[in-house]
Image (spheres, helix red, strand yellow):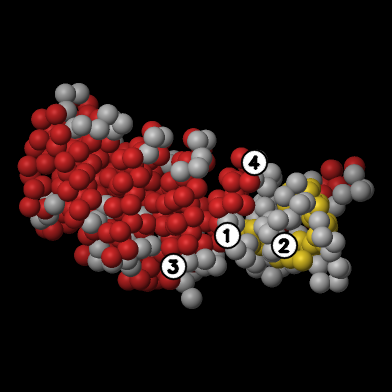
Amino acid sequence: IICLDKANKKVDVRAFSNSWVKEKGLPTIRIEYNPAVTSSSNIKELIAIQEDPYGRGLVWEQNFYVNNTKIQVEAPITEFSVGVEFDTIPPYLFINSNGDGYGRFVIDALPTKGQYLKEKNIVSRYTTLINIYENYLMKRFKNEEVYDFIKWAVTQEDNEQMISTACSYIGELLKDKEGEEVIKTEDELYQMALNSKNKIVSKTLLKILIANAKSDSVLEKLYKIWLERNNNILGERDYINLSYNLAIAMPDKWREIISLQRDRIKNEDLLKEFDFICRACTPDTLQLKELFYGLLDKNNRVQEPWAAKTLSLLNTSSREPWNNIFIKPGLDSLLEIEKSSGIFFPTDWLSALLSGHKSNDAYLIIKEFAKGIEKDKSYPIALKNKLLQQSFYLYNKYRD
């Protein structure tokens, strides 16, 4: 960096590197009408405001597009003009329409369906969906309006990556629904999966329901699909995962479900995996505790993907708040897990341990643990960051 800085006097390489490489975080970027300039009917004078969320005054120099206009951001406030044929008041601005920008792009409203469909650039529509969901995470939009828009947008697209991303957002939005809204939403998604002509939509939504369904009506429909094995979109592993979740959701049928699924498996390696994981499907809480504490022994984690799947079933949201008892000992074991496991397994362990939890109690347990290790200078920074990353959902939901 020093050599590059000396070689090029036109660019402050050190400042660039400090913002982009050395420091944490990302900018918040807003696009506003320039109050000091009167815009013409088809040209709008705008300003891009880039803010450092940590108040350090950093500037992330970059360029991105607003609609079809490229802007270069080199200061906290950048003035620019966008010339387009605006047919709505106020006009909708497709911010970061080329996807090159880096930051949280603040938007004040969702596009209308007409505005979205009129935008022919697929990357622009894709970044619009990303911006909508990220603004939901910033608590700028309500769950229902974002869910309704993304659910509709899925039906308009045929690009596999866009559909996959949009459906993943739908799955996250489903996690935040409560009470009667859960029943209504799951039924809607089941009907979409059943009736969609796009196989990617059908399979992705079905897999979301396989992993998350709570309502009796949808569980019964999924049980019928599993029992009859009449959906050729699902593969063998999908049916196995469905059997796990049905057994947990239907404790009175759990033995029947596990037994029948076991009889269907012909591959010996897959059968060994099933026998290891299916123990987490029992409704017997004493056996579940024994299974969890067994996973803290490295000798029972030789097959790490099996251990992670078992842990995720132990910590499924349908068992909360009872399974909050696993969070603290699961976090306490992180240092030992990092030393005794493969390089990616600590992340997998944390994801399996935490991703099923939705309660404030779970957040408080994690917050207290994070507070404790923050004071421990010897605790690996990478492991602290993994914890914060995997517990983002709870921090974002409950943090003051």
- Left/right placement of residue 24 relative to residue 42 reads left
Q: Are marks 3 and 2 in contact (CB under 8 Å)?
A: no
Residue depicted at 13% across the width and 52% down the height: 250
- Tell me residue 97's x, y (percent): 68, 47
- Look at the picture and state if 271 lies above or below 90: above
Q: For residue 120, which numbered disc appears in the image?
A: 4
CA–CA distance in space, label 1 to label 2? 14 Å
Residue 326 position by quadrant: bottom left
Amino acid type shown at disc 3: Lys
Q: Mark 2 highlights which residue?
A: 31
CB atoms at circles 4 and 3 under 8 Å apart?
no
Residue 103 percent coordinates (x, y): 65, 55
Q: CA–CA distance between discs 1 and 3? A: 22 Å
The answer for how far apart the CA atoms under marks 3 and 2 are is 26 Å
Q: Earlier in the sequence, mark 1 or mark 4?
A: 1
User: In x, y percent, where is residue 262?
Assistant: 13, 33
Evaluate if marks 1 and 4 touch, with contact meaning CB atoms under 8 Å apart.
no
Q: Position of residue 119 (x, y in %)?
A: 64, 45
* Secondary structure type for disc 1: loop
- The residue carrying pointer 3 sits among few (fewer than 14), some (14 to 19) or many (20 or more) residues within 10 Å by Cα, namely some
In this rendering, does residue 222 appear at all?
yes
N-terminal of the pair, mark 3 or mark 2, is 2
Secondary structure at badge 4 equals loop
Earlier in the chain: of badge 2 and badge 4, it is: 2
Q: Name the mark on residue 397.
A: 3
Q: Is residue 302 above or below residue 124?
A: above
Look at mark 1 in the image and give the residue it sits on: 110
For residue 57, what is the image quadrant? bottom right
Residue at x-position 79% and y-position 48%:
70
Circle 4 packing at 10 Å, graded few (<14), some (14-19), many (20+), is few
Spatial separation of the CA atoms under disc 2 and disc 4: 22 Å
Discs 2/4, front: 4
